[in-house]
Image (cartoon, rainbow, N blue to C red):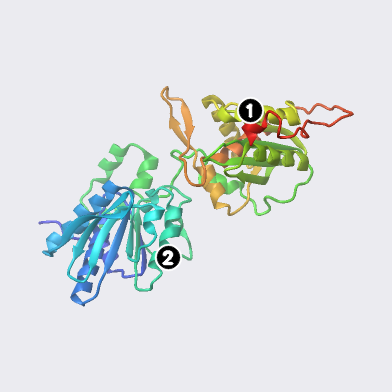
């Protein structure tokens, strides 16, 4: 007996005509196959009724977009016996769209690699294929939602999970979501007739966390994330950042000359708990401005110790910060693999002990803290890495880690008296520093 063209879980998904629909399906259960069939049927129905229907598939990559067309859209059209014209068309300066034109009224289905710029300017029904794996899917979401603002347009979001905290996680878990949601695990698909040997697949995967995510549709991020979202959740407090209470303060500063953010984290110790009183983000600012901001922090708080990133371009500003505020209060930290791991470990242990308080609802901070991943180095020792995005390069993570490290082994301030200025902060910027800091 030949297998059915569609299994019951696929037919249930197709029968759901909701305007906003999301599918979280196990790997290799036909989610792209089924969703492209829905687009094909919609276009053919529109052509028969004398209307125009247009669909755009936003895929993880150009290769994935081509695969959705070749093994989805074109496959369905050939099976139905529908003539079509296939071509590649420029979408913008450096992006091609794979397009299938159907009928004489201008209906089409096209697929393109997803990025925020390609999502703008469209007015089509949309399919977000493997959306949880799109780079910076929140920015893509912001750009594309107005595309389907017309009430006659539909949005389809399909993916396997990719950890917690991204937009797909919100779509699939929000209690007040507008989406009609379909979840199909490998067990659901097999129960509906999909011929797969679950035990064999699980033994071959040999990774419980990967199996839970890829085949059982669970939102897990413990596999590689240094700070899982559950750990971050446990440190969020509605009273943070709160008001400075005059206690000892520890500062971390991650310098950047261009591109990345310069971030200053201000932690006040209250009992044995550190509260994030300020998180200062400076983009595209001169070293003079960055140091002036640090001067303000040193004036406003009773800073016991400040740990500053001294790696690369940080060498000179750290020396200047030590000249202004004293080497007993300001430590330069070189970001070696071992030192980064030490700082990140101190931060993680403090969070596991619930001795760090973070503000609630700061999505950018949450994503930044979660962005640092643990990978195996060449010798097998763990290394910490993070992808660069428009929101930075884990700069907030490292500023807080620096401040936590400063609190972990605080130095004792040196008491002194002086008839002159306490520090040389009055040195004008037209000294020899100006060329570097200007």
Q: Position of residue 406 (x, y in %)?
A: 67, 32
Say what secondary structure mark 1 lies in.
Answer: helix
Q: Compared to 204, does 232 lie above or below?
A: below
> Label 1 vs label 2: CA separation?
47 Å
Question: Which mark, by number, is residue 293?
Answer: none
Which residue is the extreme one toward the front? 430
Q: Position of residue 364 (x, y in %)?
A: 54, 49
| Direction from residue 11 to residue 430 in the image, left or right | right
Question: Which mark, by number, is residue 316?
Answer: 1
Q: Compared to 109, does 369 lie above or below?
A: above
| Direction from residue 370 to residue 11 in the image, left or right | left
| Direction from residue 250 to residue 120 in the image, left or right | left
- Give the quarter of the figure containing the C terminus: top right
Which residue is the extreme one toward the right? 419
Viewer can see residue 31: no
Picture residue at 71% right of the left edge, 35% below the top:
429
Which residue is the extreme one toward the bottom? 49
- State the residue position of label 2: 146
Q: Residues within 10 Å of mark 1 (few under 14, many from 20)?
A: some
Say what secondary structure mark 2 lies in.
Answer: helix
Q: Report which quarter residue 209 is drawn in.
A: top left
Viewer can see residue 347: yes
Q: Position of residue 43 (x, y in %)?
A: 23, 68
Q: Nearer the viewer, residue 273 or 127?
A: 127
| Direction from residue 87 to residue 287 in the image, left or right | right
Work out whether mark 1 precedes mark 2 in sequence or the reverse, and give the earlier one: 2
Pointer 1 with pointer 2, Cβ within 8 A: no
């Amino acid at each position: 007996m030949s297998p059915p063209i569609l299994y019951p879980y696929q037919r249930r998904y197709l029968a759901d005509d909701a305007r906003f629909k999301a599918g979280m399906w196990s790997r290799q259960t036909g989610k792209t196959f089924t969703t492209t069939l829905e687009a094909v049927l919609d276009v053919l129905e529109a052509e028969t009724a004398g209307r125009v229907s247009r669909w755009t598939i936003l895929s993880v990559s150009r290769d994935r977009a081509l695969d959705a067309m070749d093994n989805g859209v074109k496959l369905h059209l050939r099976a139905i016996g529908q003539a079509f014209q296939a071509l590649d068309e420029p979408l913008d300066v450096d992006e091609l769209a794979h397009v299938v034109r159907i009928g004489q009224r201008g209906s089409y289905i096209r697929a393109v690699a997803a990025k925020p710029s390609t999502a703008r300017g469209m007015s089509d029904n949309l399919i977000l294929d493997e959306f949880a794996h799109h780079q910076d899917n929140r920015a893509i979401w912001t750009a594309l939602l107005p595309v389907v603002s017309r009430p006659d347009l539909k949005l389809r979001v399909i993916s396997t999970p990719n950890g917690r905290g991204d937009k797909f996680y919100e779509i699939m878990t929000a209690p007040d979501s507008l989406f009609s949601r379909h979840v199909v695990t490998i067990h659901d698909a097999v129960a509906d007739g999909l011929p797969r040997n679950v035990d064999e697949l699980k033994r071959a995967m040999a990774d419980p966390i990967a199996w839970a995510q890829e085949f059982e549709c669970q939102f897990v991020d413990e596999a590689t994330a240094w700070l899982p979202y559950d750990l971050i959740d446990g440190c969020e407090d509605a009273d943070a950042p709160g008001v400075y209470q005059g206690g000892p303060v520890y500062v971390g500063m991650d310098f950047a000359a261009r591109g990345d953010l310069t971030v200053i984290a201000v932690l006040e110790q209250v009992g044995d708990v550190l509260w994030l009183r300020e998180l200062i983000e400076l983009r595209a600012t001169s070293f003079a401005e960055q140091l002036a901001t640090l001067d303000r922090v040193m004036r406003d708080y009773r800073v016991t110790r400040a740990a500053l990133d001294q790696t690369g371009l940080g060498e000179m500003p750290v020396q200047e910060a030590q000249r202004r505020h004293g080497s007993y209060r300001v430590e330069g930290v070189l970001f070696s693999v071992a030192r980064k791991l030490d700082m990140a470990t101190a931060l993680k242990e403090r969070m596991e002990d619930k001795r760090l308080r973070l503000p609630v609802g700061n999505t950018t901070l949450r994503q930044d803290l979660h962005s640092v991943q643990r990978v195996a180095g060449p010798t097998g020792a763990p290394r910490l890495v993070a992808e660069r995005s428009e929101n930075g390069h884990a700069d907030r993570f490292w500023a807080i880690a620096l401040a936590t490290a400063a609190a972990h082994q605080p130095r004792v301030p040196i008491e002194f008296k002086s008839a002159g200025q306490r520090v040389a902060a009055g040195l004008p910027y037209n000294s020899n520093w100006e060329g570097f800091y200007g």
